[in-house]
Amino acid sequence: MKILVIAAHPNLQQSRVNKCWVTELRRHPDQVTVHELYAAYPEKAIDIEREQALIAEHDRLVLQFPLQWYSTPSLLKQWLDEVFTTAWLFGPGGRAVAGKELLLAISIGGAEASYQAGGLIGYTISELTRPLQALANQIGMTLLPHFKLYGAVQATDEQIESSAKQYLQYILNPELDPRIARQRMLDEMKQKMKAAQ
Ligand SMILES: Cc1cc2nc3c(=O)[nH]c(=O)nc-3n(C[C@H](O)[C@H](O)[C@H](O)COP(=O)(O)O)c2cc1C
């Protein structure tokens, strides 16, 4: 399985979490392609065909970003708006991304307890990422459970380094699609029922 990580941090040099995550991923170029969006497009002039070709070559697309005002950094939104054209997604030649997997990897400044009903923020990350979930549905991508680091601002260096290792292992797991676990559970149930007969 080929994995593409679009790392979208407006100032990666000043970053602690996203920089550490990218550094960890870059140690495994045979398994993960890392594409740093802000470094690739300092003038924000996105090469749409290049990006579409990159996506086409991979099976799993990871969008990695720091949560900024409960959303993605602006260049990532621009990238989605410009690269995911209707003609490319649905035009002749097939559905460009249908069947591919989409995974969000988000560093979140606030504490996990804030991101729930009744909490300081009051909304979950799943609620806040609804537009990206709707997009995945619309274009036939399989949305996988997010990878998240809460408390990213307060995290210690050790916690960040440990999260980077977890992140790598997480995105390398070929069986993140919840349908795989469900199918396995059904198969096990069938086998048990058969054995009990
Ligand atoms: C402009 C801006 C907006 C932010 N908005 C949020 C936010 O809405 N919610 C939140 O929990 N953290 C927010 N943060 C904190 C970042 O999510 C946090 O600094 C980042 O995830 C840490 O990762 P890094 O070390 O890679 O920069 C914001 C930070 C900036 C600079």
Image: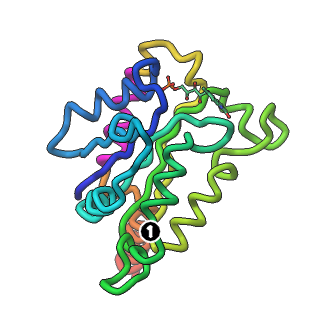
Q: Main secondary structure of the magenta part?
A: helix
Q: Quadrant of the C terminus?
A: bottom left
Residue 171 belongs to the span the image colors magenta: yes
Q: What is the residue that sits farthest to the right in this orientation?
A: 118
Q: Is residue 58 left or right of residue 137?
A: left
Q: Residue at x 33, y 30 (%)?
A: 165
Q: Residue at x 59, y 32 (%)?
A: 108
Residue type at mark 1 is Met
**Residue 133 drawn at (x, y percent):** 57, 61
Q: Which quarter of the rendered image does ligand 1 occupy?
A: top right
Q: Dot 1 lies on which element?
A: loop
Of residue 45 and residue 21, the one placed in the foreground of this image is 45
**Residue 149 drawn at (x, y percent):** 53, 32
Residue 29's place in the image compared with 161, above or below, is: below
Q: Which residue is mark 1?
A: 141
Of residue 193 and residue 145, the one placed in the foreground of this image is 145
Q: Is residue 117 left or right of residue 177?
A: right
Q: Which residues are magenta?
A: 161-172
Q: Residue at x 39, y 66 (%)?
A: 180
Q: Residue at x 54, y 71 (%)?
A: 137
Residue 62 belongs to the span the image colors magenta: no
Q: What is the residue that sits farthest to the left in this orientation?
A: 30
**Residue 1 drawn at (x, y percent):** 23, 58
Q: Is residue 171 left or right of residue 111?
A: left
Of residue 106 and residue 38, the one placed in the foreground of this image is 38
- Rendered image quadrant of residue 38: top left
